[in-house]
Image (cartoon, helix red, strand yellow):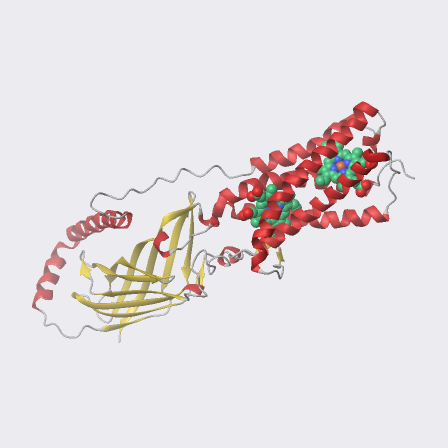
Amino acid sequence: MPQRYSQIAIVLHWAIAPLLAFQISVGWALESLGARGFSLFQLHKSVGISILVLTLARIVVRYWKPRPAKLEGGWQGALASGVHVGLYAFMLGAPLTGWALVSTAKVKVPTLIFGTIPLPHLPLPAASHRLAEGGHSLIAWLGIALFALHVAGAVRHHFLMGDGLIWRMMPRRSVALLVGLPALILVGFGVGRAILPAPAPPVVPVALADNGTTADDMAEDGDDAVDNAAMAAGNADNGMTNVANAVVAEDAPVGPPPAWTVQPGGRIGFSVGNDGEAISGSFGKWTADIVMDPDHPESATIKAVIDMASASVGDAYKDGMLPGDEFFGVAAHPTATFTATGAEKTGANAYRAKGKLTLKGVSRPQSIRFTLSGSGDTRKVTGSASILRAPFGVGNGDSSNGLAPQVALDFSFTAKKK
Ligand code: HEM
Ligand code: HEM
């Protein structure tokens, strides 16, 4: 019988222990981090699956390499063995319940282990999600309790019994290792704490004004102020042409407004603050039907249809989240539609259309602003809108805690008269 565990068993013992401490330290913070924790979620899952692999290797080693004989019989020996079995169950159970919980979540977030190997989702029924989630959280506490018993046993052997049992799990007799290897567990926990992002700034509640003005309206008023400033600037620049336009506009006979075809190469982009950073992306597929006489915007009709599944923020793994129920709910609501009848002139070439946005099955008033440049049969259209996401139920889950309430939309395209 060997005097100590095989070197490989010892290495695995002292590698897995700090990784578990790291997992618990990060895991406890994950839920409150929401979307800010995206990369941390990926890391937690990657390290967790690594622990699963290392544990499987460790179990193979356990039966392959001879182990030292049991030191103690009786109930103490049985307790020690029972705790070891429990620790193996913890090392396997924690990653398996974690894997099960992400596989059964409503919003299926893909996992890329250390940014390279995709982790498939386990084929489990969605109904098992709560069990997996509860189990994952509970197992960590059971692991901590077993760990306490395990360490108490090691300390008892070392200080009370002085039988040198601890050296069986040390590569060699060295005080530095005796202190250093257990200290790695604290390091693992500390690293987990240290890499957490700074706490989110407190969310300032948006109060309703007395007259029932909503935050939406207020934001719009703010935008109008910007529009108006732009208009003033535009007027200053284009004073002459503006007056000329106004004269022409009033005199011109009102015929049927022309229809416009959107040329390929246009863009509808979006951007939303995410805890100080910005997540921006665009929609790859959309169509717009525009009928408008720039001089008589009041008779315009605008309809834009956006294919919500075409949204991308340029990161395949975040893109995997967008179609889910937490964000666009694409399965039930594949498109978003903006319609407006009539637009108003807010500047030399600037317009505003107050219309209706239907997104994720919810319809609400929404205004967009745009400017036209060019002349004749071709116009370049650039514009923007500020959309309050909450009423549409976009970002209604845990991973959206850090997302700003307003999403900025921008668009630019070229339109040709039909
Ligand atoms: C291997 C050891 C692992 C340990 C010790 C561990 C530990 C933990 C702990 C303590 C939490 C906090 C639970 C709570 O809210 O009370 C947590 C959360 C979480 N873990 Fe793990 N974890 C491990 C592996 C994994 C793996 C492999 C995955 C996925 C593939 C995973 C996914 C998650 C997720 C998604 C959460 C957030 C839970 C939620 O939203 O309720 N974990 N983990
Ligand atoms: C300060 C922390 C730790 C110390 C001092 C320690 C010490 C030891 C010692 C001395 C043994 C050999 C017992 C014997 O020969 O009968 C052992 C075995 C074992 N330890 Fe630890 N350990 C620690 C942390 C952990 C952690 C965090 C885990 C896993 C969660 C763990 C899992 C195990 C397992 C499963 C065995 C049994 C190995 C086998 O016979 O298959 N230990 N540990």
From the viewer's perspective, tell me whether residue 151 is left or right of residue 222.
right
Task: Single out the residue that lies furthest toward the right.
Answer: 1
From the viewer's perspective, tell me whether residue 356 is left or right of residue 108.
left
- Residue 227 percent across, percent down from the top left: 22, 51
From the viewer's perspective, tell me whether residue 390 is left or right of residue 65.
left
In the rendered image, which quarter is residue 185 located in? Answer: top right
Please indicate, yes or no, whether residue 11 appears anywhere in the rendered image: no
Please indicate, yes or no, whether residue 3 appears anywhere in the rendered image: yes
Relative to 393, residue 262 above or below: below
- Residue 329 percent across, percent down from the top left: 44, 61
Task: Single out the residue that lies furthest toward the front.
Answer: 75
In the rendered image, which quarter is residue 210 located in? Answer: top left
269 and 153: which is toward the camera:
153
The N terminus lies in which quarter of the figure?
Answer: top right
Residue at position x 74%, y 28% from top?
179
In the rendered image, which quarter is residue 361 located in? Answer: bottom left
The C terminus lies in which quarter of the figure?
Answer: bottom left
Residue at position x 53%, y 57% from top?
108
From the viewer's perspective, tell me whether residue 196 is left or right of residue 113.
left
Q: How many callouts does the rendering have? A: 0
